[in-house]
Image: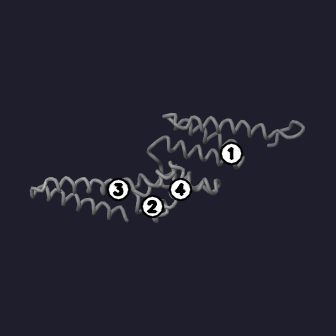
């Protein structure tokens, strides 16, 4: 359902709640007002996105992907502020299938922008992991530094430390026979 249709339905429901209250049906008016508020909230927070996030937290990426696939055209169905989060969720799901293909979703999520700093840190941390898989150490270090700056609430400190230790192991693996490094 388009966001404009959701907004029109919410306005009609809220208008009918006001009419019910004006005619003296207070309890029905309050009940319809709560229902209208719920429909208005679905304008800002898409239910498919909320359910996909919930299934990702429950470690069920198949169900999360099913809910995200119900969003056919995210530019029309989602509020502008949710476009980055949609691409972030698609990238997280795609990481489990084909990690190198998820890079474009994380970059698009960063370009569209996200309001919460820990989500941008998560996208940059994922990009650092992809860069490490591609053996691009300089880019991985850049993304790790940006992720540590964006992780203001220190939610991803353990993952960042683990990524840095893996990067140090990557340096040790570059030492080949004879003690020379391979560049």
Q: Nearer the viewer, residue 151 or 56?
A: 56
On the image, the x and y values in percent for residue 70 come to 46, 64
Q: Which residue is mark 3?
A: 42
Q: CA distance from mark 4 to mark 2?
A: 12 Å
The answer to whether mark 3 and mark 2 are in CB contact below 8 A is: no
- In this rendering, is residue 96 above or below 161? below
Q: How is the image coloured?
A: one colour
Q: Label 4: state its secondary structure.
A: helix
Circle 2: is it few (<14), some (14-19), or many (20+) Cα within 10 Å? some
Q: CA distance from mark 3 to mark 1?
A: 39 Å
Query: Looking at the image, which residue is at 79% across and 41% down?
Result: 174
Query: Looking at the image, which residue is at 66% across and 36% down?
Result: 164
The answer to whether mark 1 and mark 2 are in CB contact below 8 A is: no
On the rendered structure, is 1 left or right of 119? left
Identify the mark at residue 159; answer none if there is no mark: none
Q: Quadrant of the N terminus?
A: bottom left
Q: Which residue is mark 4?
A: 90
Q: CA distance from mark 1 to mark 2?
A: 30 Å
Query: Looking at the image, which residue is at 32% across and 64% down?
Result: 5
Which of pointers 3 and 1 lies earlier in the amino acid sequence?
Answer: 3
The quarter holding residue 9 reads bottom left
Q: Which residue is mark 2?
A: 74
On the image, the x and y values in percent for residue 113 come to 47, 49
Identify the mark at residue 132; answer none if there is no mark: 1
Q: CA distance from mark 3 to mark 4?
A: 20 Å
């Amino acid at each position: 359902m388009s966001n404009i249709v959701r907004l029109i339905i919410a306005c009609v429901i809220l208008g009918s709640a006001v009419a019910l209250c004006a005619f003296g049906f207070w309890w029905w008016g309050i009940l319809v007002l709560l229902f209208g508020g719920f429909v208005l909230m679905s304008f800002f927070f898409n239910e498919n996105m909320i359910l996909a996030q919930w299934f990702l937290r429950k470690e069920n990426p198949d169900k999360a992907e099913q809910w995200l696939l119900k969003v056919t055209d995210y530019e029309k169905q989602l509020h502008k502020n949710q476009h980055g989060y949609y691409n972030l969720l698609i990238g997280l799901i795609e990481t489990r299938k084909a990690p190198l293909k998820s890079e474009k979703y994380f970059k698009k999520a960063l370009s569209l922008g996200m309001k919460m700093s820990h989500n941008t840190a998560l996208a940059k941390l994922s990009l650092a992991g992809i860069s490490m898989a591609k053996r691009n150490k300089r880019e991985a270090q850049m993304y790790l530094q940006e992720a540590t700056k964006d992780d203001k609430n220190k939610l991803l400190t353990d993952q960042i430390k683990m990524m840095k230790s893996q990067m140090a192991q990557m340096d040790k693996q570059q030492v080949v026979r004879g003690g020379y490094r391979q560049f």
